[in-house]
């Protein structure tokens, strides 16, 4: 099974989860996703997801000046994003439970 296909369906949820406790800029969010074990995620996918979540009203953004290069655009999860994270998290847990049940080896009678 190609993990990138699975990732397409849950990248929004993963990005919201990464931003739950700490704001981040694009590359930082990408690094945190990879550190969490989502290694197949591409730069363009994360940046596109951030734009989509922001345009959907689930994230806010602000710019932080940098002395060592271009300013960084940080993203923060807002109340609507937290509500979506909770809603989507419940759906994910339910789906994962069903898949676990389907994939669990059953003893033969």
Image: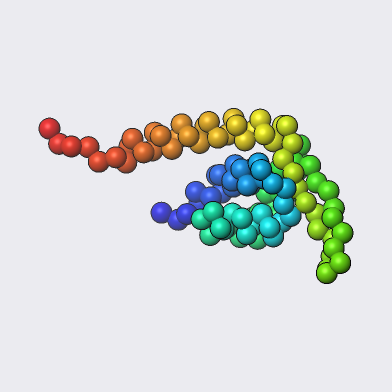
Viewer-side residue, 74 vs 101:
74
Q: Pinpoint residue 12: horizontal percent, then vertical percent.
A: 62, 44
Quadrant in the rendering for residue 36: bottom right
Which quarter of the figure is the N terminus placed in? Answer: bottom left
In the image, farthest residue toward the bottom: 68
Residue at x 52% of width, y 32% of height = 91
Quadrant in the rendering for residue 105: top left
Quadrant in the rendering for residue 88: top right
What colour scheme has been applied to the protein in the rendered image? rainbow
Residue at x 38% of width, y 38% of height = 99
So how many labels did they put on this image?
A: 0
Q: Pinpoint residue 46: horizontal percent, then vertical percent.
A: 66, 54
67 relative position to 59: left or right:
right
In the image, farthest residue toward the left: 109
109 relative position to 89: left or right:
left
Residue at x 62% of width, y 35% of height = 85
Q: Pinpoint residue 44: horizontal percent, then vertical percent.
A: 67, 59
Residue 12 visible somewhere in the drawing: no
90 relative position to 74: left or right:
left
13 relative position to 25: left or right:
left
Residue at x 49% of width, y 48% of height = 6
Residue 19 visible somewhere in the drawing: yes
Which quarter of the figure is the C terminus placed in? Answer: top left
* On screen, residue 81 above or below 63: above
């Amino acid at each position: 099974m190609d993990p990138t296909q699975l990732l397409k369906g849950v990248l929004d949820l993963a990005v919201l989860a990464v931003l739950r406790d700490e704001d981040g800029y694009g590359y930082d969010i990408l690094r945190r996703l990879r550190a969490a074990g989502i290694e197949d995620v591409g730069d363009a996918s994360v940046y596109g997801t951030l734009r989509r979540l922001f345009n959907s009203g689930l994230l806010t953004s602000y710019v932080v000046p940098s002395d060592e290069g271009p300013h960084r655009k940080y993203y923060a999860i807002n109340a609507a994003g937290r509500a979506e994270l909770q809603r989507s998290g419940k759906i994910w847990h339910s789906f994962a439970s069903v898949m676990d049940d389907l994939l669990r080896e059953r003893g033969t009678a």
